Amino acid sequence: MLLRHTPLKIQDRKALSVNPAKTCQPIGAMYAALGIHGCLPHSHGSQGCCAYHRSTLTRHYKEPIMSGTSSFTEGASVFGGQANLLQAINNIFTIYEPDLIAVHTTCLSETIGDDVLQITRKARDDGKIPEGKHVIHASTPSYVGSHVTGFANMTKAMVNYFAESTGKKKNQINLIPGYVEPPDMEEIRRLAELMNLSTVMFPDTSGVLNGPQTGRYRMFPPGGVTIPELISTGDSMGTIAMGEYASGDAARVLDTKCKVPCKILDLPIGLQATDRYIDALRKQAGTEVPAQINFERGQLLDIITDMQAWFYGKKVALAGDPDQMIALSEFLVAIDMWPVYVVTGTPGKIFEKRINEITKNSPYPVKVKAGGDLFLLHQWIKNESVDLLIANTYGKYMARDSDIPFIRYGFPILDRIGHSYFPSVGYRGGMRLLEKILDAILDRKDRDSPEESFELVM
Amino acid sequence: MVIQNEKQCSADLEGLDPQEVKNDLINKYPPKVARKRSKQIVINKIEKDQPVPKIQANVRTIPGIITQRGCTYAGCKGVVLGPTRDILNLTHGPIGCGFYSWLTRRNQTRPVGPDAHNFMPYCFSTDMQDREIVFGGEKKLKQAIEEAYNIFKPKAIGIFSTCPVGLIGDDVHAVAREMGKKLGINIFGFSCEGYKGVSQSAGHHIANNGIFANVVGLDDNVKEGKFKINLLGEYNIGGDAFAIEDLLEECGFTLISTFSGNSSYDYFANSHTADLNLIMCHRSINYVAEMMEKKFGIPWMKINFLGADSTAKSLRKIAAYYDDQELIDKVEEVIAREMPAVLKAQEDVRSRCEGKLAMIFVGGSRAHHYQDIFKEIGMRVISAGYEFAHRDDYEGREVLPTIKIDADSRNIEELEIHADSKRFNPRNSEEDLKRLAEKGIEMETYNGMMSDMSDGSMVIDDISQFETEKMIELYKPDIFCAGIKEKYSVQKNGVPMKQLHSYDNGGPYAVFKGAINFYYEVDRMVNSKVWGYIKAPWQKNPELSARYACE
């Protein structure tokens, strides 16, 4: 057994976290920053933070992830990191020539109280920031929230630094896609464009973190939201933000700052959440939903109709980020599956309330925990098993020990591909999720069926 | 800016003047950066009876330059102590550090039975929150230790400090003492805050100190067996240590402990009963070897099990050290048995790889060790460098007395070690040492990487992303070896990139069988069909000459 020390008996833990279902803020901020065109993220802390974030994102996307670091040593930790950051800004603009540097802090620079805004102002005054270039920052202490919080903070920083209201509205809407994968962002935009809407989406990592093999490496690939686009978000007709945890703050700040009204939706994962997204787009556009979208919805529905028997009544354990878990649970309930254990590492009160609402008609007792960990989830599973586990790659240790069908979903996925290329949002994303669920469940049935009932047609 | 030629170099490197290449690497840098980097980029010079050129190493990384390097915590928890399966490694800090160092290094381990402790698939953290940053984290740490003990009943707990721990002044060592006493198990702390040094290297040193001070020597039971050795600086990535263990056992050695691949707390506790320490990764573990020598009288020698020739050479060196005919015969028998398959593979792979160019920028020691394997298949390493090594790893240990201890190194405690009053037992007499010297068996030495590299080759310490891309542009190497962060930018340039930290998903590469694995791995990468598909047919032949017949 790989997780041989995980006991059945659940002891209350107040201080010890075991097998976390979250990581720290800066990595989310780094990911968000990569969704700005021509941006080099910068980690203001000691080297290890930057190395760890780059390594994890690289393993997840199998793509180059570049970022600077302030390389704190003991001296900088005592006297403050101003000199290091000023030097870094100068070096980065001279050597790598990005359009902007997006600085995020770390537990180190937050604990010593570095004022990054003041430092970047000094950099500007000292002429270290070339004309037309930018340095933005987000405060992302690792000891608050999770990687999702970091993503939300950097997305909010994009609004704080760039959004401007000229008083003249533009015929476009803002899309804040949430902490989702590059193809999800692509799909969210495609659906809006099918509704004939002009959009600005931020951040936008499509084309950045799923780039092609061309034989020529480009540190700043063509993708990402541009700075003029970010500036123009203040003049948009409205904002549709997806995922309260990852996108809510940015949408509200944009509303407050530039009077751009916002609608905060769940991530458009599965049937009903995508329905709500399309409906919001429809109202925004003031047009009818085009045949193409109805067609895709019908296809998703068709799979649910055809394969109902395999979904019905199956119990699912889930771990992942809160916005994803909420929308995914709703989808599972919609196809007659029952999420029975739902864990997110990210703290926050609304999570448990939303999951309890979504699963309120469940025939099974539902256990849900915000700020939980995979150790607890595994203990629940060991006490009463499930038919399917959905989690990031770390879930495979539980799946193997407890012999449960397993779908990799969320962050990080370190041992499979697909998440960089194929969406899990929208109706098409829903189809992909169903394909994955069916593959896992039916492969298991094939494996376990006695010879006489091993079926050709399923 | 152009740095003037400090030492005229005659050798051309692949048709390029190395001095001009060096200028290309640093021209774009701001002047201060260029001056600093120029001391860390050295054109190798090999002259008879002359030392290799001096290189600057183990100095601060320039902020913003995009470095390969990580932090002290990574070196301590991630590298040296991570591979030990039965110490419960508790990260004291916010969640990230523990999360990122959770199973990501591919250290393999084999618990001795289904009930034996194996905590490696687990990540333990105090998940420090803002209230601890304000009010201190010692209370939460104590509570976490208590909870960990109640659930897991480990025999030892290691506490690893992350950046904020040092800043807010939590005394992890006091907590360790208090809780160790309370729970009756061995609990020890490491002040390995990320900012402590200039790279992972500081963390190695801190880990060495901690494990030596708190574990080594706790168990005086002497194991049965002849030729008792410790293998130091082997982390069992991709199963290397398993391959080495098998080989050593077959030759008749008794392996007391490995630091720290496939290791257990008990092996460390007993490691002072060995006769000889063998060092693989000099950088990460030489401190333990030196301390064991001072305290217990155990001599050490540098060996290398990467590459078939190096493996044979190392085995012969150890056998010659023991000077036991039976052992010498057995070693020769094993070498004779293994080599035909090795030579056959070499010949096969050479036919497709001979003359191709490689570059290696990793580690510690691997940038040196792996050059041996590339040579065995006729490939040339034209440039190499370490991520976090010191001058002695480049130039050899004879430069140790001349290395200036700067403020960053001074931060890392140097333990004062004295001979153990009861257990100090020098394994060699004056006469033995004389005999070894006469036989040319080098003890307690390491000659470094540069003397094994060719004249005119480029040696680059702590290479930056910019320099990496420039070297690829200028030399178009056939393979580039570095770590995960470098992997895909290199491959996007159409050059295969082999990870020599984690081995991607390969290994073992150690000893004879591993060398064969590595030959074929390089062969697969260098000669993969994929590199021929990068240009689409219409990009290769853009002219529009064909016409449909119906036109």
Image (cartoon, coloured by chain):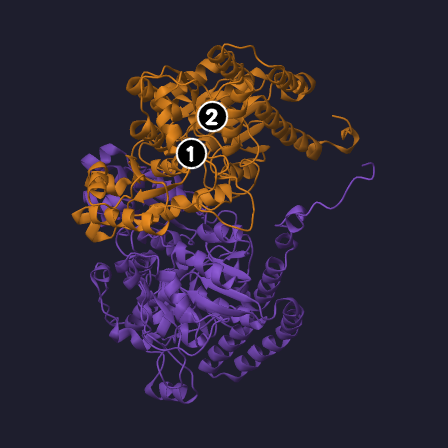
B494 in relation to A146, above or below: below
Q: How many marks?
A: 2
B158 in relation to A433, above or below: below
Which residue position holds label 2?
A: A324
Residue farthest toward the front in the current orientation of the protein: B551
* Figure colour of chain A: orange
Q: Secondary structure at mark 2?
A: helix
B78 in relation to A166, above or below: below
B177 in relation to B457, above or below: above
Same subunit under labels 2 and 1? yes
* Figure colour of chain B: purple
Q: Is residue A177 visible?
A: no
Residue type at tag 1? Ala
Residue type at tag 2? Gln
Query: In which quadrant is the C terminus of chain A drawn?
Result: top right
Q: Is residue B315 visible?
A: yes
Residue B75 occupies quadrant: bottom left
**Which disc, if any, is residue A21?**
1
Q: Which residue is at the front of the view, A255 or A352?
A: A255
In this rendering, the label closer to the viewer, 2 or 1:
2
Query: Residue sitting at 34 percent across and 56 percent down?
Result: B200
> Picture coordinates of residue A217 (x, y %)?
49, 49
Chain letter, disc 1 residue:
A
Residue A103 occupies quadrant: top left
Q: Residues within 10 Å of mark 1 (few under 14, many from 20)?
A: many
> Picture coordinates of residue A176 (x, y %)?
42, 24
